[in-house]
Image (spheres, grey):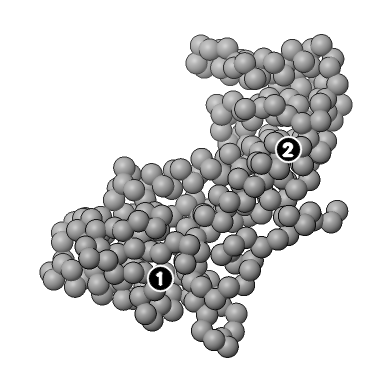
């Protein structure tokens, strides 16, 4: 199938447009792609060496273009004890990061009166590109263009290389980095749900059955996967398996939590019992 034109078009400021700016990848282990000087060859993604530079860059990235105060960086990047020469210590780490990004003039990590700012969108962040792809994909799906939606959402999901900010310890489990990482993990689930819905709309039932079974095995109490699996089994002509899947869900919830399945699972179950033909699309929430 030819990729829809809207999906093939590069995103502004993304790697797809082959610009010269720097980039930071946070959807997995932290990596950077230096800015390209005039005439330079294609750039590789580079790891960020050192716990302090990783934590400081993660904290700036999680701020999404807002200024982070020097005192805040000291408290979160040096949680055990503030270093001697407090402001100088932060400045030295920032200098290392600027060199790594090819930021000779402080254009990407800007010095502000009381802190520092990672300038977005001058610095491309993979999470921002993923969010834009997801917004576009979900919009196309809502308009009935499942072909384009599945391409856009697939491109977004491909940007995840692991857990966001993998291996970063900055600010503790309730800190800004941890909260932003949790938000990005939820965003991935949203994208995955929507991409599966697009596949269901395209009647690709067989392609998603194994994927949904895997997702359920990993998190059986996340109920939204179950009605999607029921729909895919029914669409593939496996009505008995679809009905059995509902009984598995009900047993899991009633015996384990003392609650009945939610309204979406019950709606899909009733539709399958009534023998309604699979619809072109999925109304799963």
Disc 1 element: loop
Side (left or right) of 234 relative to 158: right
For the image shown, how many numbered marks are present on the structure? 2
Q: Nearer the viewer, residue 72 or 142?
A: 142
Q: Is residue 111 visible in the rendered structure shown here?
A: yes
Observer-nearest of 213 and 35: 35
Mark 2: few, some, or many residues within 10 Å (few <14, many ≥20)?
A: few
Query: Could one spot residue 49 in this view of the protein?
Result: no
Q: Is 139 placed left or right of 164 in the picture? A: right
Of 61 and 82, the residue lying toward us: 61
Residue 71 image position (x, y, % from top left): 19, 58
Q: Is residue 66 left or right of residue 120?
A: left
The nearer-to-camera label among 2 and 1 is: 2
Residue 110 location, quadrant? bottom left
Give SS at disc 2. Answer: loop
Residue wearing tag 1: 108
Q: Earlier in the sequence, mark 2 or mark 1?
A: 1
Q: Is residue 73 above or below residue 255?
A: below
Residue 143 is marked as 2
Task: Characterize the local packing of mark 1: few (<14), some (14-19) or many (20 or more) Cα atoms within 10 angstroms.
Answer: many
Q: Residue at x 12, y 69 (%)?
A: 84
Q: Position of residue 66 (x, y in %)?
A: 35, 56
């Amino acid at each position: 199938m030819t990729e829809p034109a809207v999906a093939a078009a590069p995103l502004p400021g993304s790697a797809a447009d082959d610009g010269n700016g720097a980039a930071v990848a946070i959807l997995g282990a932290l990596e950077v792609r230096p800015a390209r000087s005039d005439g330079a060859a294609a750039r590789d993604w580079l790891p960020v060496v050192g716990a302090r530079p990783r934590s400081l860059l993660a904290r700036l990235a999680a701020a999404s273009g807002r200024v982070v105060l020097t005192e805040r960086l000291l408290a979160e990047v040096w949680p055990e004890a503030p270093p001697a020469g407090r402001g100088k210590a932060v400045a030295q780490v920032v200098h290392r990061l600027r060199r790594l990004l090819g930021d000779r003039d402080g254009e990407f990590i800007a010095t502000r009166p009381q802190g520092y700012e990672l300038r977005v969108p001058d610095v491309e962040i993979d999470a921002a590109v993923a969010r834009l792809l997801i917004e576009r994909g979900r919009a196309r799906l809502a308009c009935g263009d499942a072909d384009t939606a599945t391409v856009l959402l697939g491109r977004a999901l491909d940007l995840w290389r692991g857990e966001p900010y993998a291996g970063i310890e900055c600010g503790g489990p309730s800190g800004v980095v941890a909260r932003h990482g949790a938000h990005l993990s939820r965003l991935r689930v949203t994208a995955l749900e929507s991409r599966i819905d697009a596949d269901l709309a395209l009647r690709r039932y067989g392609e998603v059955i194994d994927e949904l079974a895997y997702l359920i095995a990993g998190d059986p109490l996340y109920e939204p996967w179950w009605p999607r699996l029921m729909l895919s089994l029914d669409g593939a002509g496996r009505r008995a398996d679809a009905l059995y899947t509902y009984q598995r869900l009900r047993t899991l919830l009633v015996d384990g939590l003392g609650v009945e399945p939610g309204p979406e699972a019950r709606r899909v179950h009733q539709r399958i019992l009534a023998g309604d033909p699979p619809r072109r699309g999925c109304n799963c929430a």
